Amino acid sequence: MNREFVVGRVTPANMFRDVEQLMGTVFRDVANSVSRTPIANVAAKATYPKVDIRDTPDATYVDATVPGLKREDIVISYEDGCVKISADKQDEIEGEFLHREIHRSSFSRWFPVDDSIYDIDSIGAVLNDGILTLMVSRREEAKAPIPRKIEVQ
C-alpha cells in the first residue's frame, strides 16, 4: 500500500508539495513585505472590474461591473491599439477597517482592439445600474457575410 502522508518518509510527491508550499509562503511574505496590499488583493485588483465580453455579427460588447460609480468617475480612452477603462474613486470613510472587501479605489483595464476589424470612431459606452457597457462596432468589410442558401440544380 502506497501512503504519501507518512511522517518522516520522503516521497517525490511529498518533496514537490513541500517545495511548492515553501515557495508560495516565501513569495507571499516577500510580496507582502514590500507592499501594504496583501498579494491576494493584488491579484484580485488585476482583474477588476469583472467583465463579460460578448460578440455579435455587428459589434463586440464589454460589460463591466462598476457599482457605485457615476459617469463622471469613469474615463474611457483609446490608445496604442487598446481601449482603456479607468476610474479613480476614493471614498473618505472614517475609522480603520477590520475587514475590507468592497473595492473603493482606482482601477484600469485595457482591452486590445484591432482597428482593421473595428471602427474606432464608433466606440460608445452606457452606464446603467452599475454596469458599464462598452460597444465597439465592426467595420463593414470585417462583418461576417450573411449565410445564404444555395439552390441545388
Image (spheres, rainbow, N blue to C red):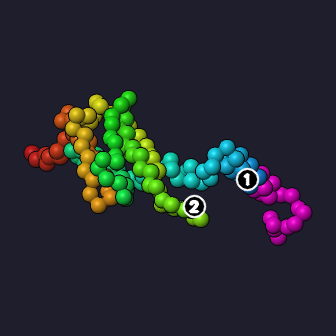
Residue 7 percent coordinates (x, y): 87, 66
Check disc 2 and give the amino acid type.
Answer: Glu
The magenta stretch is 1-19
Verify whether residue 130 appears in magenta.
no
Residue at the farthest bottom position:
1
Direction from residue 150 to residue 143 in the image, left or right: right
| Residue in the picture at 81% in, 54% down | 15
Look at mark 2 in the image and give the residue it sits on: 96
Ranked by sequence position, the earlier of labels 1 and 2 is: 1
Check disc 1 and give the amino acid type.
Answer: Thr
Look at mark 1 in the image and give the residue it sits on: 25
| Residue in the picture at 81% in, 67% down | 5
In this orientation, which residue lies closer to the viewer: 91 or 18?
91
Q: Would residue 71 be visible to someone looking at this image?
A: yes
Direction from residue 85 to residue 1 in the image, left or right: right
Q: Secondary structure at mark 2?
A: loop
Residue 44 percent coordinates (x, y): 52, 53
Direction from residue 37 to residue 67 in the image, left or right: left
Q: Which mark is residue 92?
A: none
Direction from residue 3 to residue 30 in the image, left or right: left
Where, quadrant-wise, is the C terminus in this rendering? Answer: top left
| Residue in the picture at 57% in, 61% down | 96
Q: CA distance from mark 1 to mark 2?
A: 27 Å
Residue 126 percent coordinates (x, y): 25, 50
